Image (cartoon, rainbow, N blue to C red):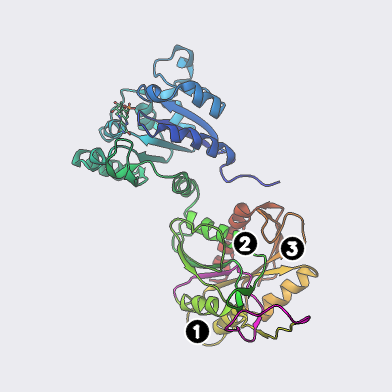
Amino acid sequence: MSQSLLSNKKIILGVTGSIALYKACEWVRNFQKNGADLQVIMTTSAQEFVSPLSFAALSGNKVFLDMFDPEEAESIPHIQLGQTCDLMLIAPATAQTIARLAHGLADDLLSTVVLAATCPVLICPAMNSKMYLNPATQANLQKLRNYGYTIIEPDSGEMACGDTGPGRLPEWEPVYENVLSALLPQDYADQQIVVTAGPTQEPLDPVRFLSNRSSGKMGYAIAKAARRRGAKVTLISGPSSLPSPAGITVKKVKTAQEMYDETFLHYEQASIIIKAAAVSDYRPEECQAEKIKKGADKEEISLVANQDILKALGAHKASKSPHQPLLIGFAAESSRHFEEGQRKLQEKNLDMIVINDIKGKKTGFESDTNKVTLLDSNGAKEELPLLSKDETAMRILDKILSLKQTVG
Ligand SMILES: Cc1cc2nc3c(=O)[nH]c(=O)nc-3n(C[C@H](O)[C@H](O)[C@H](O)COP(=O)(O)O)c2cc1C
């Protein structure tokens, strides 16, 4: 079944002597939940804050502490470790360790491993804001950027010592995003992607609306996956409880008309438009100014059709537009999936359609997994297995990229 995005990835977490170290304990769990094989290196100062036993128990692996460990002498860990892993994350990184790395010192295991590493190295500075803003620390960080290391900006706020300012260890989410970007090919770096997601809400009166069960999970997963692969992403989202993803421009809309307007507003800038939103086909003909009162045994609501956004985009592309983004649609079907998908692909002038079985047990609306079929305008059909929505998004993006190479 579904794998996690860090499956088979070997990651080294280097932890140093910062008061924020306790947060890294939870990150070990997060890495594991996402499938990573994690190994921890601790500096001597780090061991003053948390026992190596905690990291050994949490990671399920031996924790590396000492360059001169006779038990490990044969494997030469100070050279081996950084050359056999996919990524190193130093979090929290103290001013001391940052200075060591900036000057190429190799006087402890962690700095020596980094010096010999051939994988991407990500560094999360965490320290008092005055230490962080000190020109010496800033110059050291700049040196590390110039050497090709990724510095993940610290958060700003109140510190353990009571000072306020930049220097706090960031939350897991942006760190995880940086880790994924560092591990994934940046094959979307030249692309400007517009993704629509979530349901729409069509107002009936001041308290009620017509909507659907879309959670936005699939569209948000695609937006995040594209961002992780280097794209500039605009996410046009109907009402969804999902948090706005980091590094993505999010435009919130409610009605189908608002989604239509916002999508066309971004048409010219998009190289790829992916319409994963579940747009209401109909809206109440009138939105009542006052709340509809209880009383009558039967109440009829007259509905009128909304514009089909995807069809309008396809028609716009087919007619006059000199700008020709790739158009990708979604079809949520409960029966005759393939035939319906085929019809929509042609009728709406799409480059590809993603057919979703909304009746499946672990697929479609609200679910964290999905099983989709990809149909493209060249007639190729690909059925994907049941995967997490994150992985489905990756596979959809793989397909879109190969399509882009054939249709331009
Ligand atoms: C209670 C306490 C908290 C500390 N927190 C930090 C911190 O958040 N960031 C930092 O750069 N140094 C901090 N230090 C200082 C480092 O532990 C010290 O510079 C040490 O030499 C770092 O060594 P290392 O980089 O090898 O782990 C703290 C020290 C103490 C006693």
Q: Is residue 135 left or right of residue 43?
A: left
- Say which amino acid is labelled 2: Ser
Please report the bounds of the magenta region as a residue range: 269-298
Image x and y of residue 129, in percent: 27, 41
Task: Provide the residue designation for mark 3.
Answer: 357
Task: Provide the residue designation for mark 1.
Answer: 321
Q: Would you call the spot at circle 2 few (<14 residues within 10 Å), some (14-19), or many (20 or more)?
A: many
Residue at 61% of width from left, 52% of height from top?
A: 391
- Say which amino acid is labelled 1: Ser
Q: Which circle's residue, 3 or 1, is located before the other in the chain? A: 1
Of the numbered discs in the image, which one, if any, rests on residue 215?
2
Whether residue 252 is situated above or below residue 108 in the rendered picture: below
Whether residue 62 is situated above or below residue 387 in the rendered picture: above
* Tally of numbered tags: 3
- Say which amino acid is labelled 3: Asp
- Looking at this view, name the residue that lies furthest to the right: 336
Whether residue 375 is situated above or below residue 123 in the rendered picture: below
Q: Would you call the spot at circle 3 few (<14 residues within 10 Å), some (14-19), or many (20 or more)?
A: many
Of the numbered discs in the image, which one, if any, rests on residue 347?
none
Q: Are marks 2 and 3 in contact (CB under 8 Å)?
A: no
Q: Are marks 3 and 1 in contact (CB under 8 Å)?
A: no
Q: Quadrant of residue 79?
A: top left
Labels 2, 3: front one? 2
Labels 3, 1: front one? 3
Q: Secondary structure at mark 3?
A: strand
Separation (CA) of disc 2 from disc 3: 15 Å
- Magenta span: helix, strand or loop, mainly? loop
Residue at 56% of width from left, 42% of height from top?
A: 6
Residue 271 located within the stretch drawn in magenta: yes
